Image (tube, grey):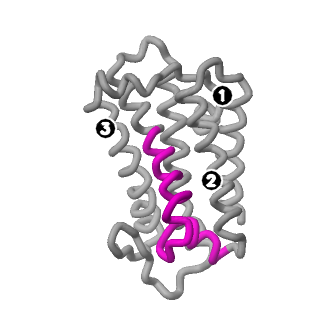
Amino acid sequence: MLAALLLPNGASAWSLNLIKQDKGNVLLGFVGGIAAHELGHISLATLKDTDVEFDRLSITYPDPNLSDQDLLELSSVGFQIQWIASELAFRYLADENTPARIRNRAAGVVLSHLAITAAYMVFLKNDRNGDIDGMSRVTGISNDRLLLAVSVPAVLDGWRLLGHAVPKWVPTASIMSKGIGITWVWTY
C-alpha cells in the first residue's frame, strides 16, 4: 500500500477560488488535516506506551527516560502523517471522476499541511515544545536546517495544488523528499 501511495501522481488543477463555492468541505478537510497531524503524535505515543500532556496547544512527553530515537519519532510523526495525508489527498485531486465535495476536502487536507508548515516557519520554529525544536534537540541539527527540510515538501505541494502547468518532476520530487524524511527518522 505504501509503495502505491508513493508512486507519482499528477497535478491537482484545483484553485483557491473553489473555497468560495464550497467553504464547508474545504474547512472540513483543513480541520481533518490538522487533527491527523496531532493524532499522529498521540497515536504513536500510545503505541510506545508514552504519556502525553497538553501545554497550551502543544503536545508534550513528560517521560524523562524517553530515548532520543523515541523523541525524534514522536516529534516528527505529525509531519510524516501530514505528508502521507497530502499524498492521499492528491490521489483524489488527480482523479477527475472524484466528486467536487471530496476534491475540496482533499484540497483542505493539503492546505492544512501548508498551513502547519507555514506556522512553523513563522512562529513555531523555536518553540521549546514544538516538533522542530524536539527534532533539533535529538539530532543536533539546527532548527533552521530542519525547518528547511520539512519546508521542501510543503513548497512543492503548494505548487502541485495551486500551480498551473506543473512540471511532472514536481510530484516526484515532493514524494521523494517525504520518503527521504520518513526513512531518515526511522533509521536514525
Quadrant for the N terminus, please: top right
Mark 1 lies on a secondary structure that is: loop
Which residues are the magenta region?
111-138
Query: In the rendering, at what x and y percent does residue 9 appear?
Result: 61, 24
Mark 2 lies on a secondary structure that is: helix
Q: As shown in the figure, which amino acid type bears the numbered disc 2? A: Val
Q: As shown in the figure, which amino acid type bears the numbered disc 3? A: Leu
Real-space Cα separation, disc 3 to disc 1, in angstroms: 26 Å
Foreground mark, 2 or 1, reads: 2
**At 71% from the left edge and 49% from the top edge, which residue is drawn?**
180
Quadrant for the C terminus, please: bottom right
Dominant SS of magenta comes to helix
Q: What residue is shown with label 1?
A: 8
Residue projecting furthest to the bottom: 64
Q: Earlier in the sequence, mark 3 or mark 1?
A: 1
Relative placement, left or right, of 109 versus 23 is right
Q: Earlier in the sequence, mark 2 or mark 1?
A: 1
**At 35% from the left edge and 28% from the top edge, which residue is drawn?**
19
Does 32 sit above or below residue 108? below
Q: What residue is shown with label 2?
A: 150
**At 59% from the left edge and 39% from the top edge, which residue is drawn?**
2
Q: As shown in the figure, which amino acid type bears the numbered disc 1? A: Pro
**At 43% from the left edge and 82% from the top edge, which residue is drawn?**
62
Does 25 sit above or below residue 30? above
